[in-house]
Image: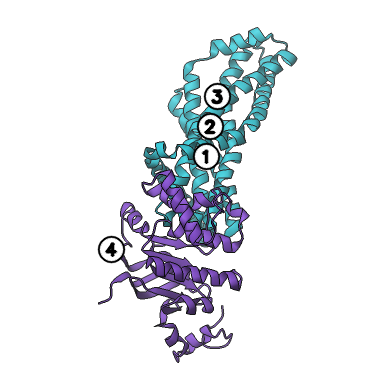
Amino acid sequence: MMDVSIKIENISKSFGKKKVLNGVTLNVNRGESVVIIGQSGCGKSVLLKHLNRLIRPDSGHIYINDQDIAKMQTEELFAIRRKIGMLFQSAALLDSLTVAQNVGLGLKEGWKYSEKEISEIVGDKLEMVGLSGAENMYPSDLSGGMRKRVGLARSISTNPEILLYDEPTTGLDPITSDLINDLMINLREKLNVTSVAVTHDMTSAYKIAGRIVMLYNGKIEYDGTPGQIKNSGNSIVDQFINGRASGPIQVQ
Amino acid sequence: MTNGFLAIGRRAINFITRLGSTFMLLLKAIYYFKDIPRSLGQIFEQCFFIGNKSLSLIIITSIFIGAVSAWQAAYQFKFIGAPLRYLGAAVGKAIVIELSPVLSALVIAGRVGAGIAAEIGAMKVTEQVDALESMAISPIRYLIMPRLFASALMIPLLTVFSAFVAIGGALLVSVLFVDISHETFLLGVKNSFKIFDLVSGLIKSTVFGLIIGVVGCHEGYHAEGGARGVGRATTEAVVISAVMIFIADYIIATILFKV
């Protein structure tokens, strides 16, 4: 039997009258790389943010290493969150802190490391994302791609077991996008992390995914390998992955 | 008609819910006061921010608060035929127990409360608050507690400073335009001064500090919808703080001063 890292069980979530997730069930195995695709606004990011409980489900369960995080107390939740790194869509670096302070923030606040150890770890992680020497710059001095890379360094600073990527390549030029893709693959291979990425960039999805899951109308529409999804025979999936304006998916 | 009542009811419920959630945030932030030793850096930074942003404003407003109080009091004294040697007593008392705490708090609410709401609001809408959460850092401990503590600490200090400056302003007007010697004026201030006045002013301004801090943080923390949301949070922070300051002022007065 495969070792399940993340188990999402029948979760639903509404915002006001809009039902965004409507009974989503999904398992992610340890070391696996799952990419969730779907239209903008279909609830991909909402689903992702359930995995470290930045958003709580209205109903259903989310198990990380067999522990249900949906109803967990703060201290237990923090212990789980320390095992999960997250790269945000806009990188979400703290404006008031330097690159090094951003990357070392989680280590400084939640772990028992000395300043010297933190600065060594920060140096290592920045080297991994190719940004050695940027330690003392501020987020406002960086380009979008650099910010994403700093965000990536920050999300791996605590050597997490699970990495969540929210639109890792959106808004980047194709070359920088590919650089981020390579970094993500590299991290998985080097650190053997379980990763879940949300994207609508199909080039990136095919490259980084072991499995692609399509979210449509608040439910999982399709779940398969990149090879399978290209020949799914599902008209909704076909319309999305080939980027056609006409088809069963109505553009809102 | 029914719609009108519904709208009023909905607003009332919203307001009460908001008040409740602000109060809950206050309690949560106070819980994290236990982490003050490890947050000294952030607290110091916030104290500096509050002091630095407010000092020049407090000096200017306080001089004029004192000056207009002395002027108006002198006018009233002449009108009812009261001896002007009591001017210092009346003005000094009014400044220490009422004018400095309330007016400084209002000025600081406009400056610091708005600043806190805008900063935390911007962090909220750009996912920086979520990023803290994702790193297992409580935003209440990391962002809110230091701001609340600094505001409860600095606003009383600024109020004491404001009282001194305001009395200076009153003295200036009294000597220059009302024709009272500075000895007479200051003797009046001194004779009427009770330590209880200062204590009551400090209690008030500490409560006002907590209000400004927690309302600013709460509005920012719940901002949503981009720049517009941040703008709305900032305005709301100032308006709600101002209203709460007046209400709290009345409640504290009725508790501390028995008539």
Amino acid type, label 1: Ile
Q: Do labels 2 and 1 share a chain?
A: yes
Q: Name the residue under label 1.
A: B212
Point out the frontmost of discs 2 and 4: 4
Image quarter of the N terminus of chain A: bottom left
Q: Name the residue under label 2.
A: B155
Q: Mark 4 points at which residue?
A: A67
Q: Which residue is drawn at 45% across and 50% down?
A: A120
Residues tagged 2 and 3 counted as in contact (Cβ below 8 A)? no
CA separation, marks 2 and 3? Answer: 9 Å
Q: Name the residue under label 3.
A: B160
Q: Is residue B158 or residue A194 the one in the foreground?
A: A194
- Local crowd size for mark 4, using a 10 Å CA cut-off: few (<14), some (14–19), many (≥20): some
- Above-or-below relation of A20 to B80: below
Q: Which residue is drawn at 50% across and 20% down?
A: B197
Image quarter of the C terminus of chain A: bottom right
User: Which chain's residue wears label 2?
Assistant: B
Residue B97 in the image, given as x and y percentages of width and height: 53, 23
Amino acid type, label 2: Ile
Camera sees residue B253: no
User: Which chain's residue wears label 4?
Assistant: A
Coloring scheme of the render?
A: by chain
Spot the residue most to the bottom.
A233
Residue A196 in the image, given as x and y percentages of width and height: 42, 70
